[in-house]
Image (spheres, rainbow, N blue to C red):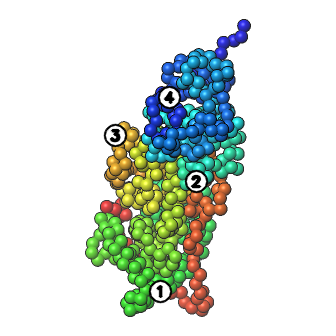
Amino acid sequence: MAAPRVTSVVFEKGGVYLHTSAKKHQDPDSLIAGVIRVVEKDSDVLLHWVPVEEAGDSTQILFSKKDVSGGDSCTSEEEPTFDPGYEPDWAVISTVRPQSRHSEPTRGVEPSSPRGSWAFSVSLGELKSIRRSKPGLSWAYLVLVTQAGGSLPALHFHRGGTRALLRVLSRYLLLASSPQDSRLYLVFPHDSSALSSSFHHLQLFDQDSSNVVSVELGPRPAVERAPPVTEEEWTHHVGPEGRLQEVPVLKARIFSGGLSPGLRRDAWKFLLGYLSWEGSAEEHKAHVRKKTDEYFRMKLQWKSVSPEQERRNSLLHGYRSLIERDVSRTDRTNKFYEGPENPGLGLLNDILLTYCMYHFDLGYVQGMSDLLSPILYVIQNEVDAFWCFCGFMELVHGNFEESQETMKRQLGQLLLLLRVLDPPLCDFLDSQDSGSLCFCFRWLLIWFKREFPFPDVLRLWEVLWTGLPGPNLHLLVACAILDMERDTLMLSGFGSNEILKHINELTMKLSVEDVLTRAEALYRQLTTCPELPHNVQEVLGLVPPTEPRSPSPPASPLPLSPTRAPPAPPPPEDTAPQPDSSLEILPEEEEESAES
């Protein structure tokens, strides 16, 4: 006696219709309501659709090419055919025909039932691709294409449910979006070898979009932040001739705990590439003398321009006007910059104008003053602050380019990470027209400068500057903030305007230690996933990028990227070095009390 078949329904959704007419105004008989199910049967998994009035187990379907004979394709002259949103090659009419009368009737479905003849069941292993509907239609649909080249009837989800179905299918299959058509999912066996080859060799993912339907992540690990690196601990890493020792260990400590305030003035020069981690104390002094001379030569270029010359130089005049306006409103509540005649404002102005001489192609763009302000506050020296600012801009200058390609790419990478970490949140944001994550634009543009209190910004930036644990930790910081706010966003029923308002109201209410802890936990959760998609691995820096241009600005400078030191004629050897005439600002109070 044969063993009984074991059948288990793992997904069921009603309100899934077949449209059997291509007319714009369809009569009720052309709409067939049904139920879609994913069924585990013996060792196979089936996708099964059956009309609502049928209770049987329909397991057969007749696949055929499009009927070009014209027997059933004529339409009324009074009513033209209606394009339901998918291309003719995917049309539901004539692509899959009901079973002919001489076919063996399916068990459980009456042969005389015209609607029962549309029921079908197909093994998931037979699927080749899945096409989603265009946005903006009255309801979403899916068209499934088999390995044999035929397509199943288009499934119209009048009550929603396409995303839920795709997530269930992704348990058994790898679904990846074609780079040529973001609405077309290609289907592959769901095993690690196929996953690796599909993403790496076929490059199925467009890195400016988020196309992972579902990835099974393990539990999120617990993370504890360490105390800040103290001056005493830093001293232990200083060896003979003033060279730093065990630099990777030191960077790891900065990543896990940050720096004590009194240490930042020296340590930031290393983190931002102004001083070499491997250099000796004497080498650093010689480097500073050279950079001081270089800075003042560039500063003299704009200082020597007369008012009459500037009237004929609209570019320089425009930079000067924009810088003056931005500087006048940058961090004015901070004691370091408050007051009408504050010398710090003059230094901000001079450094930013000199940067225009350093990087002619980029010049000054609104937002750069936000990046310079904390650096000048910590470094308190005009020359050193300038070169540290140049080091920071080397990382983020792509954010300010007119094409905005770097910002678009980062928003796409952020969406990709969020899609892997939290598909329901992405679905919610999509449903509220916020799936592009444009409300995160300011976060990425100036690295959360206006989202955290000033002391927290200092801690956040020094952690990000370590480049640990990968090149795009700032994207995981954004994911961490959204993760912290997901319940508020989703349970409050916010629309797009309310989402934007809520995100803006987070300003100065976030704890940097909580956010960094969660960001590191998200990183560990992702990196322990054995089937992490290749393009996600690229974003996290786990594998080298497959394209010449890296998704991370630090790893591969974009066009218009300046060199660390622009070419300049070397001074004669017998020329005495120019005195350091940069202004030193020493606060009257301790650093902590200088913060507003």
Real-space CA distance between mark 2 and mark 4, rounded to the nearest whole angstrom: 39 Å
Which amino acid, mark 1? Gln
Residue with the mark numbered 2: 207
Residue with the mark numbered 1: 301
What percent of the width, then of the height, locates residue 366? Answer: 41, 69
What percent of the width, then of the height, locates residue 186? Answer: 63, 43
What percent of the width, then of the height, locates residue 404? Answer: 49, 64
Query: Which residue: 67% across, 21% down?
Result: 102
- As drawn, 284 above or below 446: below
Label 1 element class: helix
Say left or right for 316 vs 251.
left
Which amino acid, mark 2? Gln
In the rendered structure, which disc, 4 or 3, sits on the residue that comes first in sequence? 4
- As drawn, 575 above or below 196: below
Query: Callout 1: few (<14), some (14-19), or many (20+) C-alpha neighbours within 10 Å?
Result: few
Whether residue 582 can be seen here? no
Which amino acid, mark 3? Ser
Where the C terminus falls, by quadrant?
bottom left
In this rendering, the label closer to the viewer, 1 or 4? 4
Which amino acid, mark 4? Ile
- As drawn, 291 above or below 138: below
In the rendered structure, which disc, 3 or 1, sits on the residue that comes first in sequence? 1
Single out the residue that lies furthest toward the left: 340
Label 2 element class: loop
Whether residue 88 can be seen here? yes
Residue with the mark numbered 4: 32
Where the N terminus falls, by quadrant?
top right
